[in-house]
Amino acid sequence: MRQVVGRKVVVLGLARSGLAVARLLHQEGARVLGSDLKPMEALGQEARDLRDLGVEIETGEHSDRALAGADFVVVSPGIPGDVPILAKARRAGMPVYSELEVASWWVRAPLVAVTGSNGKTTTTTLMGRIFQRAGWRCQVAGNIGFPLSASVRSVPKGGVIVVETSSFQLERIETFRPQVGVILNITPDHLDRHGSMEAYVKTKARLLMNQKASDTTILNWDDPRTAALEAESPGRVVPYSIQQEVGGGVFVRGGRVISQLGETEEIILEAKEVGIPGPHNLSNSLAAVATAQIMGVNLSVCAEELADFKGIEHRLELVRVLEGVKYVNDSKATNVDAVKQALLTFTEPILLIAGGRDKNGDFQQLQALIRRRVRILLLLGEARGKMRAAWGDLVDTILVKDLEEAVHAARSRAAPGDCVLLSPACASFDMFRDFEHRGQVFKEVVQRLGQQKIRGSSCP
């Protein structure tokens, strides 16, 4: 635990994680100043409550005054490292930490930390449900939407905290140490921020940098970049694979999920019994099994939860079936590889709704799958021109002005047996608050279908 009593701490960004860490630091005796570019009325009641408790709140700017006399800075993950106030903090020799780092100073329970380009939220949620089914006191936190800072006081030493960790959070850790670190995959993502694939991989590998010999690293053996991180782990490495047998790990053989983590090989369940669809989710399920078994959960509990778990909102979520057409919300697919996994999941002809704010994705990687799996493309947002240049000659392509027009255009062209899939391959910030807002709008529009006259597409 860091000594923070009486020290001045600046918290930059007062969204969920910033507010939570500001409250935690205040409770621990720090003098906290929270700074956000938004006006106070846009920050909500929790910010006003913190101000009433004595936390100084600065709005509308990140001023030089905020740094005066500060001992360290806690920065929200959405704030890039090149903003002027962080440059000034670095020049002054002031430490800059992520909320994840600071919250970990007060963690009492063992930490399981999960990162990867895709599948983090699904896997983290599944792990949490397995632990809870086994009777553990468990909190799922981190990048999933519930800050670690809000969890550290509620989970005792005998429990477990499962933390979803993003590359943005890992950029600014120093002592954060998971007893079990899980890396699911590393595919191109956030290159607009990290600058290169090499830098992105190094940031993901930071998850392991403080582990000890007594800790465990769980790695996806089917992903070459992830498997190569075996050399970065100071502790025990446990592999998992859906493509090959991996000694001392968890794998699929003959259609069965098998573990070799114990003294004897054990069959967990039939792969077809896993409740969430797609090969990527089977892989995620193996990671969850390996984690739970390492922590001491009985494999029969794992098998029960894997069969019962049907996924989470905005991840290959079946919204409805209308007139024989599936409508699927995969708004969390914010990069190219996530869309690849979605396209591999369905056997039906797909009407793909994609687009948004480009994260420097290589859309040409999907050309073969688009040609094979997609019947019609409906493109929107800032990236639609780049997407049309990569895919437009492969299948019928329609440009639309917004998500509502995309859904109506898809309905007017869909036939029974088709799948209308929102899987954007982009961030949402050009048109929506976040991927959850985008997915919710999609679901609302889909649920209204049948109550309105079918509209066609008019945007050129």
Image (spheres, rainbow, N blue to C red):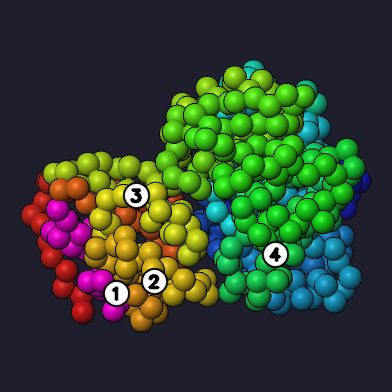
Q: Is residue 172 above or below residue 444?
A: below
Q: The N terminus lies in which quarter of the figure?
A: top right
Estimate how packed mark 4 is, as few (under 14), some (14 to 19) or many (20 or more) residues with alpha carbons within 10 Å.
many
Asked whether the residues under the numbered discs 1 and 3 touch, taking CB atoms below 8 Å apart as contact, a structural biologist would say no
First reached walking from the N terminus: tag 4 or tag 2: 4
The residue identified by callout 4 is 201
In the rendering, at what x and y percent does residue 30 appear? 83, 48
The residue identified by callout 3 is 346
In the rendering, at what x and y percent does residue 91 appear? 85, 76
The residue identified by callout 2 is 367
Amino acid at pointer 3: Phe
Which sits in the foreground, 454 or 148?
Answer: 454
Q: Cα distance, mark 4 to mark 2? A: 25 Å
The residue identified by callout 1 is 394
First reached walking from the N terminus: tag 4 or tag 1: 4
Q: Secondary structure at mark 2?
A: helix
Amino acid at pointer 2: Gln
In the rendered structure, does residue 327 fall within the stretch colored magenta?
A: no
First reached walking from the N terminus: tag 1 or tag 3: 3
Q: Secondary structure at mark 1?
A: loop
Which residue lies most toward the left here?
453
Q: Is residue 212 left or right of residue 119?
A: right
Residue 56: tell me if it is visible: no
Foreground disc of the pair 4, 2: 2
First reached walking from the N terminus: tag 4 or tag 3: 4
Q: The C terminus lies in which quarter of the figure?
A: bottom left
Estimate how packed mark 2 is, as few (under 14), some (14 to 19) or many (20 or more) residues with alpha carbons within 10 Å.
some
In the rendering, at what x and y percent does residue 158 appear? 78, 23
Q: Quadrant of residue 457?
A: bottom left
Q: Which residues are magenta?
A: 392-415
Residue 283: tell me if it is visible: yes
